[in-house]
Image (cartoon, helix red, strand yellow):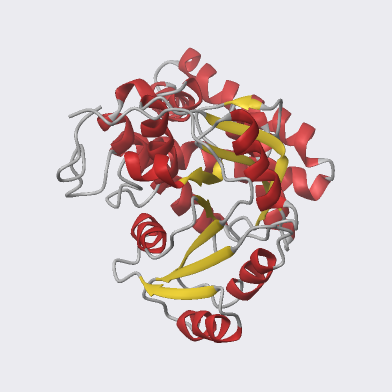
Amino acid sequence: MSDPAIGPPSTPEVPNVAVVIPVRDGEATLADAVASVLAQELDGTLEVCIAVGPSNDRTREVADGLADADRRVSVVDNPAGVTPAGLNAAIRATSAPVVARVDGHAVLPADYLARAVAVLDRTGAVNVGGVQEPHGQTPFEEAVGRAMASRFGSGDARFHYGGPEGEVDTVYLGVFQRTALEAVGLFDEVLVRNQDYELNWRLREAGGTVWFDPDLRVSYRPRGTLGALARQFFEYGQWKRVVVGRHPRSLRWRQVVPPAATLGVAVGLVAGIWWLPALVAPLGYLAAVVSASLVAGRRPATMLRLLAVYPTLHLSWGVGFLTGPPRGVGRRAAGQDAS
């Protein structure tokens, strides 16, 4: 059975918005994220639902305290602990016709929701989003942010570096028409990573428009160590492989480059032991990394960090994609029709 078609939605004149926040081990950042939501300049009513996964810190106590302090805030359990399950639980626990995803480490500008709802109304889109704006608090995080906000680091994904307003394949976070979300079955709870891209693919396949507005900006704190960054992008690559297995036509050129570069570097280094011309691939990639680091780094210390950050982004993602999905993950979720 194919997904039902999504026609042009209608947004209420006085918008009511449900903000859904999946969080796990978020004691240090959750209060700031929720405070930025509650401070939104919005004419309609606001619901905030926090889905708390099993945590090793006081995340649940912080969430319960926020709910006790403001009747607009509620808390639901996310026993599975994965992001899409938490998002779906929070969506089902709310009722507003517009649903905004916010992460537990994000901070919204005061006009974010009002502007997003206005863009939904103006464009007839089913999902709108803007720029993921990295704000590192350490020199290493700053370098990661510069890498992620560059074309060399992220390809043509506009939500990383900005660009013209218009239709795109995916956006950061997202502000959705509830009817569109429900029509395609919400988030796929099997997908630990890449669940937002996969949802946006289904929304677009059902006839909806995903819209990028560069004036919608949300701050994001990058990973703080090289190991954490490598794990993050390895998982991105693994779960992208799962999504491509389900939706082969969703593959974009920017998602082909990391595995191709990884293969080229690996094969070139091995073959170069016997045949020196084979080193052209790894040496060419090294030259590209050095050039991109000089352009994006601005300061010598940041440039040096980028020499490690860029290969970590690309090669970890590439290895994850090439090695394939985690054990036991099938081509599609149980009961979900192939597109």
**What's the residue at 48%, 75% (across, down)?**
74
Q: Position of residue 224 (x, y in %)?
A: 61, 61
- Nearer to me, 319 or 116: 116
**In screen coordinates, is 26 left or right of 165?**
left
Decide which of 63, 58 is in the foreground and name it: 63
The residue depicted at 72 percent of the width and 28 percent of the height is 291
Residue 113: % across, % down: 66, 52
Q: Tell me the residue at 40%/33% (across/down).
A: 203
Q: Is residue 98 left or right of residue 242?
A: right
- Regarding residue 131, the answer to whether it shows in the image is no
Q: Residue at x 72, y 67 (%)?
A: 39
Q: Residue 136: horizontal and vertical position, in percent?
A: 71, 57
Q: Tell me: residue 279, above or below residue 305.
A: above
Classify residue 216 by image quadrant: top right
The location of residue 46, given as percent across then percent down, is 59, 63
The reply to whether residue 7 is in sight is yes
The number of numbered discs placed on residues in the rendered structure image is 0
Return the residue nearer the eye: 133 or 94.
94
Q: Residue furthest right?
A: 299
